[in-house]
Image (tube, rainbow, N blue to C red):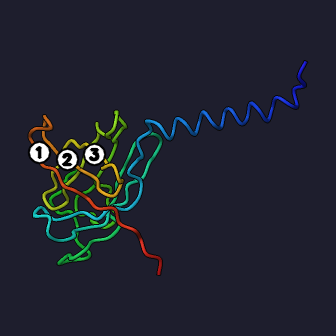
Amino acid sequence: MLKMSFLNPILLGCSALVACSALAFGEVAAPIGFWETQDDSGSKEHAIVEIYQQDSKLFGKIVQLVNAKDPNAVCDKCDDDKKDQPVKGMVIVWDLEKSDDEWSGGHILDPKTGKEYKCRMSLNEEGNELEVRGYLGLPLLGRTQTWKRFVKVEE
């Protein structure tokens, strides 16, 4: 009969192997981190958005405005508690949940217009581009932006 002290390392090793296999096969990486948004023409950077996880949902907030006419801009066209609040630091993506290989079910705010849209996101295979689609009603009725992963440089 095998002693329990001998089995513990074996069971621990098997558990770790199973956990690593689950991550290696089929687990889609979350787009946690910093992303550089583009203006609608896709020609110049607009903002740096930090995507973070809270509980099991994804959220995103603007941490830096890039090429902004007013770096202290406020959301004067927003409704509710975002009205006249600074755009920098504002949560513009909320309540996205993982669904297969994308995150959906949440919303995104366009601070320029104050309009909120349903939202879904998906990472490319390399994990360096994030397709962000905002839409009204059906995903067919909307637009997609490609955000580029931003590597924050420590000063």
Pointer 2: residues within 10 angstroms few (<14), some, or many (20+)?
many
Tell whether 88 sits left or right of 14. left
Disc 2 marks which residue? Answer: 133
Closer-to-camera residue (139/148) = 148
Residue 116, position in %: x, y? 19, 48
Asked which quadrant contains residue 111, the reply is bottom left
Q: Secondary structure at mark 2?
A: strand
Q: Answer yes or no: do the residues labelled 2 and 1 have beta carbons within 8 Å?
A: yes
Label 1 packing within 10 angstroms: few (<14), some (14-19), many (20+): some
* Amino acid tagged 2: Arg
Mark positioned earlier in the residue sequence (1 or 3): 3
Residue 39, compared with residue 143, is above or below; it is: below
Q: Which residue is mark 3?
A: 121
As shown in the figure, which amino acid type bears the numbered disc 1? Gly
According to the picture, the residue beneath numbered tag 1 turns out to be: 142
Secondary element at tag 3: strand
Q: Position of residue 86 (x, y in %)?
A: 28, 67
